[in-house]
Image (cartoon, rainbow, N blue to C red):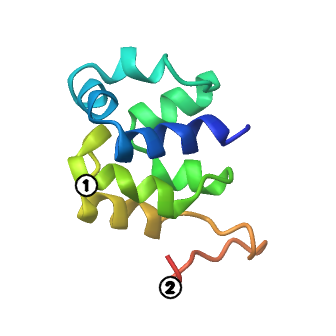
Amino acid sequence: MSVYGVHKLCRAALHDIATRQALKTDPGAAVDKFPLTPEEKSLLLDGDVAALWERGASGFLLSYLTRWDIFGLTVEVYSQRMRKARDWRYPDGATVTSGR
């Protein structure tokens, strides 16, 4: 999975009002305008930030989406989901309790 498209979408949501509005009104069509794999599209539309982070997406850039409740992501929802992420730095399967 290349996270370039995910990062591009997050930055576009921050800087481009038209993109932001499209992501809110018709997210399925809006994500098609970015270079995303089918898996990335599905994870974004589901608001699965933990799975995206586990695959290399920036948690900082993903957090931009909470500013406008894109993909159902509020700060609270984002935080709850990220707390469930499995950290690749801990191969024994420990979850992260700080640092995100």
Residue 89 lies, in percent from the top left, at 75, 74
Q: Is residue 86 left or right of residue 49?
A: right
- Secondary structure type for disc 2: loop
Question: Could you tell me the amino acid type at mark 2?
Answer: Ser
Tell me residue 65's x, y (percent). 34, 49
User: What x and y, as percent, mark residue 50?
Assistant: 51, 55
Quadrant for the N terminus in the image:
top right
Nearer mark to the viewer, of 1 and 2: 1
Q: Which is nearer the N-term, disc 1 or disc 2?
A: 1
Neighbor class of circle 2 (other Cα within 10 Å; few <14, some 14-19, many 20+) is few
Residue shown at 49%/16% (left/top)?
32
- 75 horizontally vs 87: left or right: left
Residue at image position (29%, 54%) is 66
**Residue 98, disc:** 2
Count residues near mark 1 (Cα–Cα under 10 Å), then give few for <14, some for 14-19, many for 20+: few
Q: Residue furthest bottom?
A: 98
In the image, which disc is placed on residue 88? none
Residue 73: image location, x then y, percent? 29, 49
> What residue lies at 74% left-to-right and 76% top-to-bottom?
90
> Which is more toward the observer, 8 or 69?
8
User: What amino acid is labelled 1 in the image?
Assistant: Arg
Whether label 1 touches label 2, CB < 8 Å: no
Quarter residue 19 falls in? top left
Number of disc labels: 2
Instruction: Residue under label 1, please give it.
Output: 67
